[in-house]
Image (cartoon, helix red, strand yellow):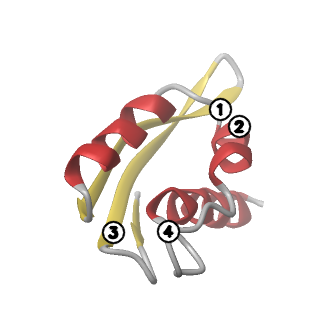
Amino acid sequence: MIYRTSGTCSSQISYDIVNEDGVEVVRNVVYTGGCNGNLQGIGRLVEGMPVDEVITKLQGIRCGYKSTSCPDQLAKALVAYKAEQA
């Protein structure tokens, strides 16, 4: 899936959601743009985590004076994914 970010240095996030033993987990998170090393780190840290856990951990993180951040944008992407599935 691809999510176009807003208010951050990155312009989009691509990711997969995989059902593993009845739990939807996040896989293959890749940011376009932004702070490459930090964003690779976020992708690796959330790899294999349940969608709801990623949302809980990343939602609301701010970057400096901005009202959002690259981690927060991933949480928003996953919230949007869940809304589409409902």
Q: Residue at x 56, y 73 (%)?
A: 68
Residue 59, placed above or below residue 68 = above
Q: Are marks 2 and 1 in contact (CB under 8 Å)?
A: yes
Q: Are marks 1 and 4 in contact (CB under 8 Å)?
A: no
Q: Label 1, on which residue?
A: 50
First of labels 3, 2 by sequence position:
3
Query: The disc labelled 2 sits on which kind of residue?
Result: Glu
First of labels 3, 4 by sequence position:
3
Farthest front residue in view: 64
Q: Residue at x 69, y 27 (%)?
A: 23
Secondary structure of the residue carrying tag 4 is loop
Q: Label 2, on which residue?
A: 53
Residue 63 bears which disc, if any?
Answer: 4
Query: x and y percent of residue 55 in the render?
Result: 68, 49
Q: Residues within 10 Å of mark 4 (few under 14, many from 20)?
A: some
Query: The disc labelled 3 sits on which kind of residue?
Result: Gln
Residue 12 bears which disc, if any?
Answer: 3
- Between the residue at mark 3 and the residue at mark 4, the CA separation in whole angstroms equals 16 Å
Q: Residue at x 42, y 41 (%)?
A: 42
- Between the residue at mark 2 and the residue at mark 4, the CA separation in whole angstroms equals 20 Å
First of labels 2, 4 by sequence position:
2
Q: Residues within 10 Å of mark 3 (few under 14, many from 20)?
A: many
Query: The disc labelled 1 sits on which kind of residue?
Result: Pro
- Report the front residue among 16 and 33: 33
- Report the front residue among 3 and 55: 55
Residue 2, placed above or below residue 25 = below
Q: Viewer-nearest of labels 3 and 4?
A: 4
Query: x and y percent of residue 7 in the render?
Result: 45, 83
Secondary structure of the residue carrying tag 2 is helix
